[in-house]
């Protein structure tokens, strides 16, 4: 069986190319699960972890589920075929809630989430919490992750939420133009600190759109940080084979 990790799909009804990639990916997972039943092999997708920014924007379950209904239906189909799907909030879709879970068949998991696969303890994150040099972003993140802020935002009419979200995105793009790459990338010191706290030698995250496998030493022992790519026609899921 296989466990797959993807991140930063940024699904958007305006981006047919990205949606096409997602369609192809879901169909390949469904085929693998069906072939496994037919051939009695271990090629099925046991679990899928989506580590944030599944959607380009999410302004509340009530407003966004209808916008992304096609993708949500596809996730439910994959879930019903036997794949456990876990979704982490990203900086674009941190307002996904229980109605999303019910509609999609997915399970929402917190940022900094540990799993064990084939005797490996793996730490999962969206990745933005490691961008400690970007003080402005971390202040913004703290504000929008506050439950009171979120409740106030979700209580607003949908049209007002749309307007606020558009303003935030435009401001974020403008701010990003002025920042050096090292500001928006993760801090290796922050990575090491949190990996030590969680006693994990492997970290998988997205967010930065800088796919790579970074090998390093953690208290004298080998460790690695796997950075997932954003969603393009060439992007591939990171895969770990599991016994069984």
Image: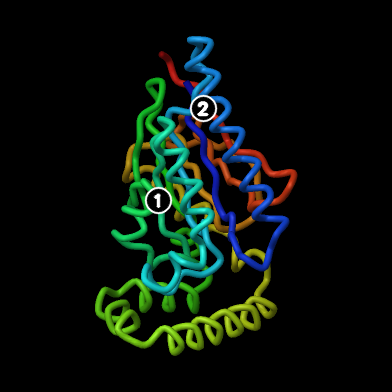
Q: Which residue is drawn at 53% across and 55% down?
A: 70
Q: Which residue is drawn at 26% across and 74% down?
A: 147
Relative to residue 56, is residue 171 depicted above or below? below
Q: In which quarter of the image is the C terminus?
A: top left
Secondary structure under tag 1 reads helix
Between 21 and 116, the one lying in front of the other is 21
User: Residue at image x 47%, y 53%?
Assistant: 72
Residue 220: give its label.
none
The percent coordinates of residue 4 (x first, y second) are: 51, 35
Which mark is nearer the camera, 2 or 1? Answer: 1
| Residue 70 in sight from this viewpoint | yes
x then y, percent, for residue 139: 42, 77
Q: Residues within 10 Å of mark 1 (few under 14, many from 20)?
A: many
Near-viewer residue (179 or 231): 231
Determine whether, in the image, residue 151 is placed left or right of residue 128: left
- Residue beneath label 1, please? 104
Whole-angstrom CA distance, mark 2 to mark 1, is 24 Å
In terms of depth relative to the viewer, which is nearer, 167 or 136?
Answer: 167
Q: Name the residue under label 2.
A: 240
């Amino acid at each position: 069986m296989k466990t797959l990790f993807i991140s930063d799909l940024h699904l958007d009804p305006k981006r047919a190319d990205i949606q096409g990639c997602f369609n192809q990916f879901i169909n390949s997972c469904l085929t693998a699960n069906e072939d496994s039943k037919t051939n009695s092999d271990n090629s099925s997708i046991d679990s899928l972890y989506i580590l944030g920014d599944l959607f380009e924007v999410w302004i509340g379950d009530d407003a966004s589920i209808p916008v992304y209904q096609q993708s949500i239906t596809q996730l439910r189909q994959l879930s019903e075929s036997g794949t456990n799907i876990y979704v982490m909030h990203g900086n674009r879709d941190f307002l996904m809630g229980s109605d999303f879970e019910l509609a999609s068949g997915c399970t929402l998991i917190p940022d900094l989430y540990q799993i064990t696969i084939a005797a490996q303890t793996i730490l999962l994150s969206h990745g933005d919490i490691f961008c400690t040099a970007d003080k402005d972003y971390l202040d913004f993140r703290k504000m929008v992750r506050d439950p009171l802020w979120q409740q106030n935002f979700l209580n607003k009419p949908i049209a007002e939420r749309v307007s606020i979200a558009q303003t935030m995105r435009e401001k974020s793009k403008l701010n990003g133009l002025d920042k050096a790459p090292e500001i928006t990338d993760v801090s290796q010191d922050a990575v090491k600190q949190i990996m030590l706290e969680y006693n994990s030698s492997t970290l998988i995250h997205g967010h930065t759109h800088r796919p790579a496998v970074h090998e390093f030493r953690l208290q004298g022992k080998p460790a690695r940080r796997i950075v997932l790519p954003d969603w393009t026609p060439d992007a591939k899921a990171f895969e770990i084979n599991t016994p069984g």
